[in-house]
Image: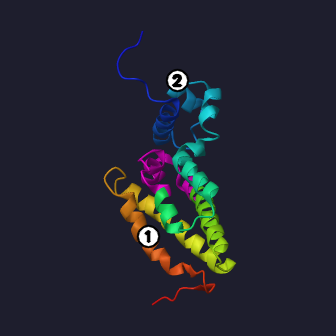
Amino acid sequence: MTTGRPRASSREVLSEAACELFLERGFDATSITDISARAGVSRSSFFNYFESKEAILWSSLDGRIETLRAETPVVDAAAALMDMCRDLQPDSLALALVNAHAMGLVDELERGAAVRSARIAAAVSTSLVAAGADPVSAAICGAAHAGAVMVSIERWARAGAGRASLTDELAHALAVAAVTLPDARAGKPLPLD
């Protein structure tokens, strides 16, 4: 019988094992079998938690993006994005962003970030079109707001995800992106002061 502190969930153990191996061997040289063995779970158990090695890095953000997409259209895109990122914990994504070169993840992170950015942009754009914005303004605004989220997460991770405030980073970035918000009543972009 084992006593003491309860073991972390298999999801957490797999994520930790993957990050250790990515640092030791690099992303490409690490297999799902390697990750499963390090975590002490079967290879088939891996797929109960993640669909791929890449999914380990993005899982917490992906869940939040899916929630945002399910709630689309939203009335206030900036508030919805702040809610989406609220309480995001330093995890494998933050570790990967800081250690991308050592983990051999630079290209993988760029591809993954583009996919997540496109999903966020589509949710924002759909919401703006539903509110009466023209599709071009909505698409540009969606891209700007998605970029604000991705830049904020990277800056938060690099500043020390446990020490820096993602909320502050995101509030600043969304304020910068706000110039792209269309005036839904007139179907025109807001003036740039």
Numbered circle sitting on residue 173:
1
Q: Is residue 187 above or below residue 66?
A: below
Q: Residue furthest top?
A: 1
Mark 2: amino acid: Gly
| Labelled pair 2, 1 in contact (Cβ < 8 Å) | no
Q: Nearer the viewer, residue 100 or 124?
A: 124
Main SS, magenta residues? helix
The reply, left or right, for residue 129 in relation to residue 10 is right
Looking at the picture, how far across and down is residue 48, in whole percent?
A: 63, 32
Q: Counting residues from the N terminus, which is met first, the one under dot 2 or under dot 1?
A: 2
Q: Secondary structure at mark 2?
A: loop
Tell me which colouring the rendered structure shows.
rainbow
Q: Residue at x 67, y 79 (%)?
A: 136
Span shown in magenta = 84-110
Q: Residue at x 54, y 79 (%)?
A: 180
Q: Would you name the residue on which mark 2 appears?
A: 40
Q: Is residue 39 above or below residue 158?
A: above
